[in-house]
Amino acid sequence: MPTVTAKLSEDGLVLNALFTISLDLEKKLREEGKPIPKPISVRALIDTGASGSVVKSEIAEKLGLTPIGVVQIKTPLSKSEKGDECYQYSMRMGMPEHQLTYNGVFVASGLAGQNIGALIGRDMLQHGILIYLGKENQFTLSLL
């Protein structure tokens, strides 16, 4: 089981991650002889309070992705009671130095005012194990 252990940063449970296109899209582009977009490196915050995983909107734009759906999300910064309408994208997040990869759906949002490019939510965490060692000021994440 791929595992990463890291110290907490002042921003919390943060990991460096690479975002790229989904495996299916990569296969299609290779078959068509088209270029594969380069991965984008961001800081990703593990957020057990987030039901879904989120990336900054510009990541999907830089990768040239087409939305696969739309979803309403509620955050403390939502402009209405219903929340904000955001696009969903099929993407791949990886941490190559730890052989950790996740293929799934990410919601694109602004993540305004935060020093991160992505949130790792419970939709991803349900496929693994998260251990928080408070006295050691560290955490471990494993994805199945």
Image (tube, rainbow, N blue to C red):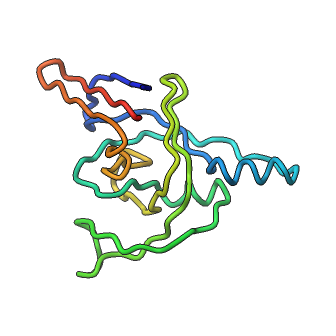
Who's the residue at 79% across and 52% down the image?
29
- Name the spot of residue 95 as percent of width and height, x first: 50, 31
- Is 34 on the left or on the right of 39, as rendered? right
Who's the residue at 40% across and 41% down the image?
44
The quarter in which the C terminus is drawn is top left
Q: Hey, which residue is sitting farthest left in the picture? A: 135
Who's the residue at 27% across and 34% down the image?
130
Q: Hey, which residue is sitting farthest top in the picture? A: 136
Nearer to the camera, 37 or 89 = 89
Q: Hey, which residue is sitting farthest right in the picture? A: 33
In which image quadrant can residue 8 be found? Answer: top left
* Number of numbered discs: 0
Check the image and report above or below for 84 versus 45: below
The quarter in which the N terminus is drawn is top left
Who's the residue at 26% across and 27% down the image?
139
- Name the spot of residue 67 as percent of width and height, x first: 58, 68
- Name the spot of residue 14 as percent of width and height, x first: 34, 35
Nearer to the camera, 124 or 138 = 124
- Name the spot of residue 121 as percent of width and height, x first: 33, 50
In which image quadrant can residue 11 be found? Answer: top left
Check the image and report above or below for 88 versus 59: below
- Is 48 on the left or on the right of 95, as rendered? left
Check the image and report above or below for 134 versus 91: above
